[in-house]
Image (spheres, helix red, strand yellow):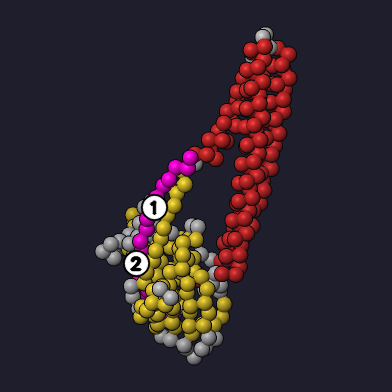
Amino acid sequence: MKSFSSLKAILAVGMLAGTLIGCAPSVTSSYRLEPVTGDVITIDGRPVTKAEQNGIGVVASFEREDMEFITLDIEVKNRTDHSIEVNPADFHFVALGASQDTLSEPTNTALVLQRSAADPNYEAGRVKLKRKQEEKRLKRAKIFNTVLMVAAIASDVSSSSNSRSYHEYANKQAAHYLAYQGIAVKRAIDHSTFADRMQRYDYEEYRWRELALRANTLAPGESVRGFVYVPKLANATYLAMTYTVPEQAVVPVLFKQEYVQQKKQRR
């Protein structure tokens, strides 16, 4: 009886694995930002704005939604007579409502809802940590799957010798077959999840290394271009972006944001 109870627990794990892969809800979201201040022009169907203060210029446009970030295509121009330090962390974003009123943090209304652009060096370090955590997760899953298989085999052997009738034997054999299938499905899900996440981390590493605007020194007359990644602010109707060069300039750009979210049940 004890071995058959263990079998039911194993079978439940397999059935749950199948349920998770077949019925998980998929969430799709769509962001679109459009600049509404500065010298706005349309290039290749995309609104692009230019703003400048004290010889420091910013050219900005919305690129795309990228996982947990909104991606902006940014070019910084140095029209001064001295070098400046360019750092993506100097891009700041404040969430505004429909009346361009400042929004508050959901967890603390005394604080303004604002974010700084992602630091590529910091985010690249986080990718390495994510890889290690995912490798540990797969190792734990393999150990658990082995325990399940050993328990299923022990239950199978025990029930085969303790069956009182052919009908009982056939039912137990069918249950064990489903248990083995469930364990196989769980193993496949574990490895598929691992492969998907590692592929995502490969892209994230490439994003921070090759695509993102990185900190550097910009000589007079030079410009630098790259993607600036800002965490999503779903409740904002407008995003007030400022690029700050300490003690030299604060270049503002206002974006209007549209956001649509849909949830579909996979079958």
- Which dot, 1 or 2, sits closer to the camera? 1
Q: Position of residue 222 (x, y in %)?
A: 53, 86
Residue 151 location (% of width, % of height) = 69, 26
170 and 257: which one is in front?
A: 170
Disc 2 target residue: 256
Task: Determine crowd level at label 2: few under 14, some 14-19, many 20+ residues with C-alpha closer than 10 A.
Answer: some
Q: Seen in the image, is 6 located left or right of residue 33?
A: right
Taking the magenta stretch, the answer to whether it contains residue 249 is: yes
The answer to whether 147 appears left or right of 87 in the picture is right
Where does the magenta region start and end?
Answer: 247-267
Residue that sits furthest to the left in the current view: 99
Picture residue at 66% right of the left edge, 35% below the top: 184
Q: Where is residue 143 in the image (x, y as percent from the top left)?
A: 70, 37
The residue sitting at 65% across, 44% down in the picture is: 191
Q: Residue at x 41, y 58 (%)?
A: 30
* Tag 1: amino acid: Gln
Mark sitting on residue 198? none
Location of mark 1 (residue) = 261
